[in-house]
């Protein structure tokens, strides 16, 4: 598969600094085929690390090459010098701690890992821009900007409805515990399945009805306080009986792993890049000229996504300059109407989808599929996060589209990525955290493992999906073939586990102030470069800045 799987073959990058962010970025670039040369301390203007392409065999010698600076606080006027400072000053401790009533340290270097993926993505996007005839860019990102991106939906909700973000009571469920001591997580998006499951376990209808809204909304609120009667019902049955009830009701269920290093099947790469066609530059669309300084300017992405992972991946591609067009069902995505509202649309939906176009199409019908194909005929990327089998039922799988759009980059943002044996449960954030050992990794001393209700694998999974898509675009530009990109939430879990093994979070207390009010943070002038407002709600700005590379590199200045 050559250049498709390793689109950075022939590239050399110099990496300066030893933060986790720069090490994550370097590892991602190596996995894409790049040779990474490490250097000394990070330069003063990039205290968390610097990356610069020093050689690219596929770029003419008279062309510049991209670089990326990584800072801790970036544009935020609050001093930060490490992961704990960022978690404190940018709201991660606050949102992670909502479930138990007080800010808490997230016991993985989540923001640093996200910043590393963003930095690697900036380098790959910068190379893509040069290949497409654009100007080499000097990119910058920061761990604080990565944190703000991770919290953008929570900030949007907090600024549009400050009264709707009350913390938990100090006790939270799930996970639940069965009579034989097995701790487990469940997932369903259907109220009727929720009702059937708890009815089978003997819970009373008032508790079942009262528990559905907080369970359903926990992805948005990071709080899930359920009626005690539900936990009591679960505790009244051995796990095999609970599991049987879940399967009968159509509810996904997984045991919470006690092992933070639970063995997972090996994968070839975090992105699984594969060619879908053998045609070489059948048309000129793989080489659309760059528009503006944004690396993906002039490219078009069509997405059919919902919830967090897929929409955020599309949002990132848009922040890199691509035009994003959503395929939505007739009447629009139902998430558009989920409170709290900001100017007639859901604030949470806008946090992940503002600026995108939309085309309505009923993909269950022939006319709807024809509409989708017309939109895709002039696109560069198709991004979807459907569950397994749905793309085939819609006749919109990678093979289907390769026949009508040979140069397409087909990106699937999935869930389990072969980490869970068949039959697989729903591939959602908290189930993935529970099964892969992330919940155990996060466990505080004396407390049992429990997933954080901050959607860490959704967010990091979105970054990985966007990263793989940009790599697929570079592979297409170099080979002319269509490319399939396959990523999942389980890839985010693997990366967090690997990063923790490589660099456990410092146990020292943060020196930065601990944010406990997201709305106040978004309104604070010290954070004005981190958030933007439409007058109804605030959202995170782009996690990168891009400018033409006119300045010299740190090593050229030495």
Image (cartoon, helix red, strand yellow):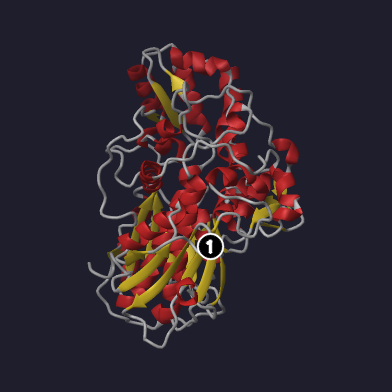
Give the residue at x 41% y 25%.
Answer: 184
User: Does any portion of residue 363 appear in the rendered image?
Assistant: no
User: 500 or 161, which is in the foreground?
Assistant: 500
Q: How crowded is mark 1: few (under 14 residues within 10 Å), some or many (20 or more)?
A: many
**Residue 349 image offset from top left, x and y in percent:** 61, 51
**Residue 309 image offset from top left, x and y in percent:** 48, 50
**Disc 1 secondary structure class:** loop
Give the residue at x 46% y 33%.
Answer: 442
User: 336 or 264, which is in the foreground?
Assistant: 264
Vertical placement of residue 57 versus 52, above or below: below
**Residue 356 image offset from top left, x and y in percent:** 58, 63
Vertical placement of residue 444 versus 58, above or below: above
User: 61 or 264, which is in the foreground?
Assistant: 61
Residue highlighted by disc 1 = 46
User: Does any portion of residue 185 appear in the rendered image?
Assistant: yes
Give the residue at x 54% y 37%.
Answer: 508
**Residue 22 image offset from top left, x and y in percent:** 44, 57
Q: In this rendering, would 440 be left or right of 141? A: left
Q: In this rendering, would 83 be left or right of 484? A: right
């Amino acid at each position: 598969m050559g250049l498709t799987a390793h689109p950075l073959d022939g590239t050399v990058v110099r990496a300066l600094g030893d933060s986790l962010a720069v090490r994550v970025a370097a590892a991602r670039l190596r996995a894409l085929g790049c040779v990474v040369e490490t250097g000394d301390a990070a330069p003063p203007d990039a205290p968390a690390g610097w990356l610069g392409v020093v050689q690219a065999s596929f770029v003419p010698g008279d062309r510049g090459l991209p670089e990326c600076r990584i800072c801790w606080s970036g544009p935020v006027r609050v001093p930060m010098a490490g992961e704990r400072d960022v978690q404190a000053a940018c709201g991660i401790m606050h949102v992670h701690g909502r479930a138990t009533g007080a800010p808490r340290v997230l016991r993985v270097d989540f923001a640093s890992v996200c910043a590393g993926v963003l930095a690697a993505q900036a380098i790959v996007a910068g190379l893509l821009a040069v290949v497409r005839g654009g100007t080499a860019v000097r990119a910058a990102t920061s761990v604080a900007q990565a944190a703000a991106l991770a919290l953008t939906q929570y900030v949007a909700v907090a600024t549009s409805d400050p009264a709707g973000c009350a913390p938990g009571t100090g006790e939270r469920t799930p996970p639940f515990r069965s009579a034989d001591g097995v701790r487990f997580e469940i997932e369903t998006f259907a109220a009727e399945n929720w009702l059937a499951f708890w009815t089978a376990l003997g819970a009373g209808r008032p508790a079942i009805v009262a528990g559905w809204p907080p369970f359903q909304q926990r992805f948005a609120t990071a709080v899930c306080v359920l009626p005690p009667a539900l936990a009591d019902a679960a505790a009244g049955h051995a796990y095999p009986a609970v599991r049987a009830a879940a399967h009968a009701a159509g509810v996904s269920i997984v045991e919470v792993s006690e092992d933070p290093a639970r063995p997972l099947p090996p994968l070839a790469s975090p992105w699984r890049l594969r060619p879908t066609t053998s045609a070489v530059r059948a048309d000129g669309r793989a080489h659309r000229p760059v528009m503006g300084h944004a690396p993906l300017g002039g490219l078009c992405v069509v997405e059919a996504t919902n919830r967090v992972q897929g929409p955020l991946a599309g949002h990132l591609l848009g922040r890199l300059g691509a035009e994003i067009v959503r395929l939505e069902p007739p009447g629009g995505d139902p998430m558009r109407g989920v409170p709290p509202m900001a100017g007639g649309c859901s604030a949470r939906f806008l946090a992940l989808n503002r600026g995108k176009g939309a085309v309505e199409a009923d993909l269950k019908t022939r006319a709807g599929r024809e509409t989708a194909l017309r939109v895709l005929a002039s696109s560069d990327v198709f991004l979807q996060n459907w569950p397994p089998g749905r793309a085939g039922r819609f006749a919109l799988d990678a093979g289907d589209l390769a026949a009508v759009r040979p140069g397409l980059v087909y990106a699937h943002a999935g869930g389990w990525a072969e980490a869970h044996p068949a039959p697989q449960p729903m591939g959602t954030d908290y189930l993935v955290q529970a099964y892969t050992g992330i919940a155990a990794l996060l466990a505080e001393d004396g407390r049992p493992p429990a997933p954080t209700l901050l959607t860490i694998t959704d967010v990091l999974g979105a970054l990985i999906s966007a990263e793989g898509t940009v790599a697929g675009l570079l592979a297409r530009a170099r080979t002319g073939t269509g490319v399939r990109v396959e990523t999942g939430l389980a890839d985010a879990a693997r990366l967090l586990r690997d990063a923790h093994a490589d660099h456990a979070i410092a146990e020292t207390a943060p020196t930065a102030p601990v944010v406990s009010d997201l709305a106040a943070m978004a309104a604070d002038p010290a954070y004005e470069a981190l958030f933007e407002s439409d007058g109804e709600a605030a959202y995170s700005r782009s996690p990168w800045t891009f400018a033409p590379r006119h300045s010299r590199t740190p090593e050229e200045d030495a």
